[in-house]
């Protein structure tokens, strides 16, 4: 809850007129307890998880031929029941595992000063810097947590559920054993703990993190994906290989970027796989060109 009751009081505390975003935030949060604002994350998760993968899922189910050239594992076709099972189980596990954590972690977050709700709102530069720090911290810690989950015990007891889908879809991004949800989700909270932020930044961070998870699991490699402009971003092709190999995978543990896999040598299988695909593609193109040349020469002779 904000420490001022009226807009003039807020502007007097700021020493300036509120921006339109600050005015909107003031109207929304002025009488709402901080605890309720903190719990918005649960609703945000459900909305983003439900809607973000939906268009691609509908297209794949209704018009697969349109997307087939971009599908990373085109031989795998999932039924609508598989989509529904994935969605229902993920939402259930989130509400039973992460939901209580969200509700009960507020006192610790408040005590540590992880988030603030007052004015001013963060600048664009501050927001971008915090997002960069959070992504880098989460990616590095998540890399090692993911590797631990691929040990024999971690995989057999916990992580195997996530790998039930060897050809992932967007909804698989958060499909996992309930304890996996807690373990793999922990690194995402480290960034805000190290670099405290505004509540709106906290919300945005988890929206970004969810969208990255859904994007890396979508199972398609579109040529015009703007995420490809992000340096070292792994994307769907990078993580799809991890799922394709499955239990024996010792490659591509990074969740966002690729530099950890490169630095620690866990992308060798993936690089070999890409080189093999490139070689096969080149051989197929050469074969087609040779066949066209032969047909042309035979036509001239006739």
Image (cartoon, rainbow, N blue to C red):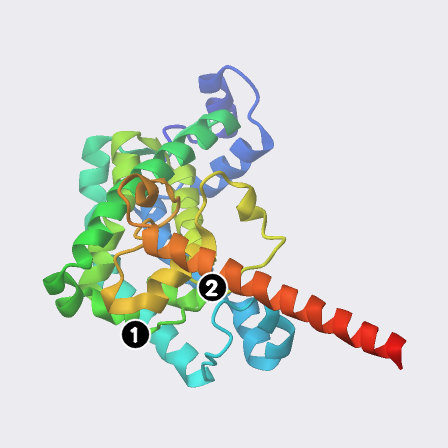
Q: Position of residue 135 (x, y in %)?
A: 37, 39
State the quadrant of the C terminus.
bottom right
- Upstream in sequence: badge 2 or badge 1: 1
| Residue 48 vs residue 8, the one in the foreground | 48
Q: Specify whether 211 is left or right of 23.
A: left
- Residue at image position (57%, 21%) is 17
Residue farthest toward the left in the current orientation of the protein: 153
Q: Residues within 10 Å of mark 1 (few under 14, many from 20)?
A: some
User: In terms of image quadrants, where is residue 82?
Assistant: bottom left
User: In terms of image quadrants, where is residue 165?
Assistant: bottom left
Tag 2 and tag 1, C-beta contact below 8 Å: no
Q: Which of the numbered marks, if any, corresponds to residue 218? A: 2
Tell me the residue that label 1 is attached to: 164
| Residue 281 vs residue 146, the one in the foreground | 281
Q: Position of residue 225 (x, y in %)?
A: 58, 52
Residue farthest toward the front in the current orientation of the protein: 301
- Residue at image position (28%, 45%) is 265
Where disc 2 sits, the SS reads loop
Question: Measured along the vertical axis of the image, is residue 30 above or below residue 225?
Answer: above
Q: Specify whether 225 is left or right of 242.
A: right
Q: Specify whether 300 is left or right of 223.
A: right
State the quadrant of the N terminus.
top left
- Residue at image position (56%, 42%) is 229
Where disc 1 sits, the SS reads helix
Residue 271 visible here:
yes
Q: Position of residue 152 (x, y in %)?
A: 12, 63
| Residue 190 vs residue 199, the one in the foreground | 190
Q: Which of the numbered marks, if any, corresponds to residue 89? A: none
Q: Position of residue 264 (x, y in %)?
A: 26, 42
- Residue at image position (31%, 41%) is 260
Q: For the residues marked 2 and 1, what is the alpha-carbon distance in whole angstroms?
A: 15 Å
């Amino acid at each position: 809850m904000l420490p001022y009751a009226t807009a003039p009081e807020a502007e007097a505390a700021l020493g300036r007129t509120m921006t339109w975003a600050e005015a909107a935030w003031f109207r929304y949060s002025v009488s709402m307890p901080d605890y309720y604002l903190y719990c918005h994350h649960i609703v945000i998760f459900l909305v983003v998880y439900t809607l973000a993968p939906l268009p691609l899922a509908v297209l794949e189910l209704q018009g697969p031929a349109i997307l087939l050239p971009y599908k990373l594992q085109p031989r795998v076709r999932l039924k609508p029941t598989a989509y529904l099972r994935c969605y229902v189980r993920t939402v259930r596990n989130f509400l039973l595992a992460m939901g209580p954590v969200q509700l009960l972690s507020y006192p610790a977050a408040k005590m540590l000063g992880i988030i603030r709700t007052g004015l001013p709102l963060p600048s664009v530069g501050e927001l971008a810097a915090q997002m960069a720090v959070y992504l880098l911290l989460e990616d590095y810690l998540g890399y090692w947590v993911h590797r631990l989950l691929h040990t024999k015990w971690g995989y057999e007891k916990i992580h195997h559920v996530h790998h039930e889908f060897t050809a992932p879809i967007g909804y698989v991004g958060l499909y996992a054993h309930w304890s996996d949800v807690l373990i793999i989700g922990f690194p995402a909270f480290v960034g805000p703990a190290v670099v405290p932020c505004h509540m709106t930044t906290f919300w945005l961070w988890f929206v970004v993190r969810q969208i990255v998870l859904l994007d890396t699991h979508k199972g398609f490699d579109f040529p015009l994906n703007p995420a490809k402009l992000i340096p070292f971003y792994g994307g769907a092709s990078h993580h799809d290989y991890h799922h394709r190999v499955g239990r024996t995978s010792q490659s591509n543990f990074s969740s966002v970027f690729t530099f950890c896999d490169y630095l620690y040598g866990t992308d060798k299988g993936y690089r070999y796989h890409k080189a093999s695909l490139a070689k096969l593609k080149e051989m197929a193109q050469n074969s087609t060109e040779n066949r066209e040349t032969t047909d042309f020469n035979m036509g001239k002779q006739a």
